[in-house]
Image: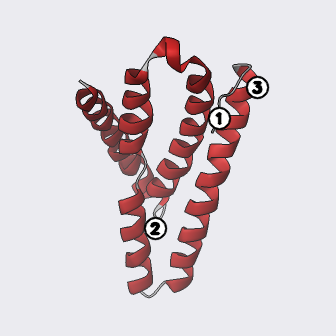
Amino acid sequence: MNLLWVALGGAVGASLRYGLALVCMPLSRWALGTLVANVLGSLLLGGFMAWWLPRAAELGESLRLFVAIGLLGGFTTFSTFSYDTLALAFGGRPLAAVLNIAMNLFGALGAVWVGWWIMRGWASGAGAV
């Protein structure tokens, strides 16, 4: 059953990521869809885990599997980020490749922290990270 929750969440998350890529594609030559997915997904994961951890016993593992592993795992895009970075570097844009790495890494790490911080205060309580 756990595999089903992850698979269902992953299908939804990957579909949302594809839709985001379609929306962002005409807006930028940059891998904007990947960046937005990584930072937004990290923000949502930080917030979700801050909310879920203190309630894990009552909410159950199935919700975490669906949202954190499936939905947000399918939505964020590490393999796509890696390919986009390589394409920028091999496409004669090494500075853009380095900026892509920095923005995804620091944007995603910062977003997880912000999501955690917001939800921790809002849900009044946070479990261990």
Single out the mark in the foreground, 3 or 1: 1
Asked which quadrant contains residue 60, the reply is: top left
Q: Amino acid at mark 2?
A: Arg
Q: Which comes sooner in the sequence, label 3 or label 1? A: 3
Q: What residue is shown at x 51% (from left), y 56% (from top)? A: 35
Q: Amino acid at mark 3?
A: Gly
Asked which quadrant contains residue 55, the reply is: top right
Rendered image: mark on residue 29: 2
Q: Which comes sooner in the sequence, label 2 or label 3? A: 2
Q: What residue is shown at x 58% (from left), y 62% (from top)? A: 105
Q: Is residue 64 something one can see in this rendering?
A: yes
Q: What residue is shown at x 37% (from left), y 77% (from top)? A: 87
Distance, label 3 to label 1, CA atoms, is 14 Å
Is residue 57 found left or right of 91 in the rendered image? Answer: right
Identify whether 119 is placed above or below 105: above
Percent of width and height locating residue 47: 61, 32
Q: Is residue 27 something one can see in this rendering?
A: no
Distance, label 2 to label 3, CA atoms, is 38 Å
Residue at the disc numbered 1: 128
Secondary element at tag 1: loop
